[in-house]
Amino acid sequence: MFFVGIVFLFFGGFFVYGSRWIVRIIGKNDQHTVVIIKTIGMIMTLLAFWLILSGEFPRTLEFIRIFSRQKGVLLCQRRI
């Protein structure tokens, strides 16, 4: 799931930042088309973010696990 998330993140970033090239390929140069392309890119990047954090991390990237539910730094609940 981690690598699928990385691929989705790459394509989502391309859709958001490369919308000018995509519009040139499609041939429709209006504002509505650009907004749709950028929205698709943002949805793909949000899905990628969720896939990266919920999937299994490769052993070489275990340091990213600060968002994990088991040993997470940010989600750790301490009682004082």
Image (cartoon, rainbow, N blue to C red):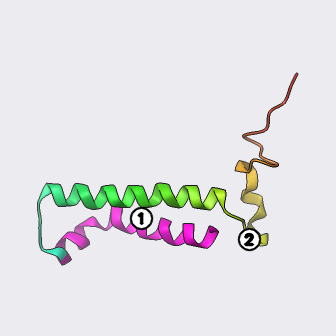
Residue beneath the point at 55% across and 56% down? 49
Q: Is residue 62 left or right of residue 27?
A: right
Locate residue 64: give its quadrant.
bottom right
Q: Residue at x 37, y 61 (%)?
A: 41
Q: Residue 37, position in %: x, y?
A: 27, 62
| Residue 79 percent coordinates (x, y) | 86, 25
Give me the disc on residue 12.
Answer: 1
Q: CA distance from mark 2 to mark 1?
A: 22 Å
Pinpoint residue 35: horizontal percent, then vertical percent: 23, 54
Answer with left or right where residue 30 lies relative to residue 35. left
Q: Badge 1: few (under 14), some or many (20 or more) residues near its Cα, within 10 Å?
A: many
Q: Residue furthest bottom?
A: 25
23 sits left or right of 76 in the view: left
Residue range (magenta): 1-25
Residue 21 lies in the magenta stretch: yes
Assess whether residue 5 is covered by the magenta stretch: yes
Q: Amino acid at mark 1?
A: Gly
Picture coordinates of residue 48 (x, y %)? Answer: 52, 61
The kind of residue on which mark 2 rests is: Pro
Residue at 51% across, 72% down: 7
- Pick out the residue farthest to the right: 80
Helix, strand or loop for disc 2: loop
> Is 26 drawn above or below residue 29 in the view shown?
below
Q: What number of labels is visible?
A: 2
- Residue labelled with disc 2: 58
Q: The C terminus is located in which quarter?
A: top right
Q: Nearer the viewer, residue 50 or 30?
A: 50
Q: Earlier in the sequence, mark 2 or mark 1?
A: 1
Q: Residue at x 30, y 58 (%)?
A: 38
Dominant secondary structure (helix, strand or loop) of the stretch shown in magenta: helix
